[in-house]
């Protein structure tokens, strides 16, 4: 436990290594082997370290509940159903997406190294969590990566542009360019909604209002109360960028859902299955296009040009995609990871349900 003061009153602050052990024990007790428990634990805790608490250990109560109800299968691997040159199609059979998406990404990396590019489809995966993790793996292999993901789970909670009810989910897109000794990777990882559903959950737990313009109530009126997403009558999260974010969210359904042979969000989609992700990944070797020297010189120059812009708020200088995560990781490695009281109580109860003390 860290001596650092929590940023949220009543929050617990826990060292990352302690938290990893708790998560591993919970997963092992629920049926995961040591390798799977390690991968899922590291993925979740690393998301917390990066500042993305919405994709971190707060998901454990849902994971444990879905294991009990056989909505996620322990120790499953990505099954290669078609190997067609640079194209690979995998089925996850509703195993833990953290393992499946990693395996599919590693397969794509080898194909891209050999042939310059790879296109990888993954369908029927249980929650793959933070997509930026797979982009980081690709960046470590000096590859450009593009990920489209659709989310199918329960009641749809994201409105389309001009609509007043939930029709889609937070469907993320991630695009990443590798770094080198002169500049860090540029990892653009975002939900197509104004705010990720997990961030709404954290605000709901903390009894904190959301910024105006992020959610609407059941009548379509603007709201700042996250309860409108979690209590009846249910409202919806707005897409970012109006028609632009809405269009990208639909594109995730078309590319990550329909194209890969997975399910999409529609009126007939069952709402009682576990959180399902389908993903389309594109991996590119930049050395097939230009020299490393030219490529990274131009990247370094444009990133410097962008960050040299005078800040609107001097206390918050301009940063590029991936920098907030690096800053959060450094801070939380030193100070510990804050977990709000409601989320922590849920983790403790989920741990107890599988005979683990948190």
Image (cartoon, rainbow, N blue to C red):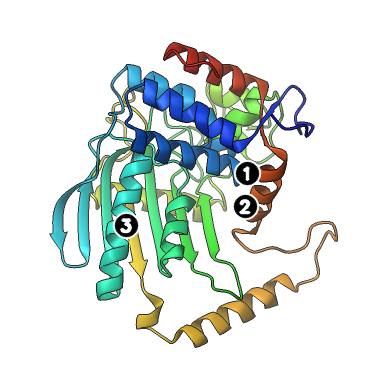
Which is closer to the viewer, label 1 or label 3? Answer: 3
Q: Residue 62 location, x and y as percent?
A: 44, 24
Residue at 50% in and 56% down = 244
Horizontal relation, residue 309 to residue 267: left or right: right
Label 1 secondary element = loop
CA–CA distance in space, label 3 to label 2: 23 Å
Binning the other alpha carbons within 10 Å of mark 2 as few (below 14), some (14 to 19) or many (20 upward) gives some
Label 3 secondary element = helix
Q: Residue 194 location, x and y as percent?
A: 58, 45
Of the pair 242 and 139, the residue shown nearer to us: 139
Residue occupied by mark 3: 106
Q: Quadrant of the N terminus?
A: top right
Of the pair 339 and 34, the residue shown nearer to us: 34
Q: Are marks 2 and 1 in contact (CB under 8 Å)?
A: yes
Mark 3 / mark 2, whichever is N-terminal: 3
Binning the other alpha carbons within 10 Å of mark 3 as few (below 14), some (14 to 19) or many (20 upward) gives some
Residue occupied by mark 1: 51
Residue at 66% in and 26% down = 340
Image: 79 above or below 34: below
Q: Residue 296 location, x and y as percent?
A: 53, 80
Mark 2 / mark 1, whichever is N-terminal: 1
Of the pair 297 and 333, the residue shown nearer to us: 333
Image: 346 above or below 320: above
Residue occupied by mark 2: 325
Image: 96 above or below 207: below
Binning the other alpha carbons within 10 Å of mark 1 as few (below 14), some (14 to 19) or many (20 upward) gives many
Corner quadrant of residue 288: bottom left
């Amino acid at each position: 436990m860290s001596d650092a003061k929590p940023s949220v009153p009543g929050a617990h602050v826990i060292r990352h290594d302690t938290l990893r052990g708790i998560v591993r024990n919970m997963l092992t007790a629920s049926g995961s082997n040591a390798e799977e428990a390690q991968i899922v634990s590291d993925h979740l805790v690393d998301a917390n370290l990066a500042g993305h608490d919405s994709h971190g250990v707060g998901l454990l109560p849902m994971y444990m509940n879905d294991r009990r109800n056989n909505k996620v299968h322990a120790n499953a691997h990505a099954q290669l159903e078609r190997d067609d040159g640079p194209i690979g199609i995998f089925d996850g059979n509703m195993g833990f997406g953290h393992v499946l998406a990693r395996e599919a990404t590693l397969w794509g990396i080898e194909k891209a190294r050999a042939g310059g590019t790879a296109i990888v489809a993954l369908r029927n995966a249980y929650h793959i969590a933070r997509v930026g993790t797979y982009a980081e793996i690709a960046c470590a292999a000096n590859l450009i990566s593009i990920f489209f993901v659709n989310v199918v789970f329960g009641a749809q909670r994201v409105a389309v542009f001009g609509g007043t009810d939930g029709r889609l989910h937070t469907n993320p897109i991630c695009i990443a360019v590798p770094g080198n000794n002169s500049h860090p990777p540029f990892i653009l990882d975002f939900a197509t909604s104004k705010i990720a559903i997990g961030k709404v959950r954290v605000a709901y737990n903390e009894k904190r209002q959301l910024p105006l313009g992020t959610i609407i109530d059941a009548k379509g009126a603007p709201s700042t109360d996250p309860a409108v997403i979690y209590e009846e009558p249910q409202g919806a999260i707005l897409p970012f960028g109006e028609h632009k974010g809405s269009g990208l969210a639909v594109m995730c359904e078309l590319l990550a859902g329909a194209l890969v042979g997975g399910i999409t969000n529609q009126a007939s989609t069952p709402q009682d299955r576990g959180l399902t992700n389908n993903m389309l990944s594109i991996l590119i070797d930049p050395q097939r296009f230009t020299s490393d020297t030219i490529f990274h010189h131009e990247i370094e120059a444009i990133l410097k040009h962008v960050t040299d812009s005078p800040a609107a708020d001097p206390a918050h200088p301009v940063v590029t995609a991936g920098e907030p995560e690096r800053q959060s990781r450094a801070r939380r490695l030193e100070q510990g990871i804050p977990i709000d009281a409601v989320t922590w109580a849920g983790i403790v109860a989920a741990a107890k349900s599988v005979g683990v003390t948190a």
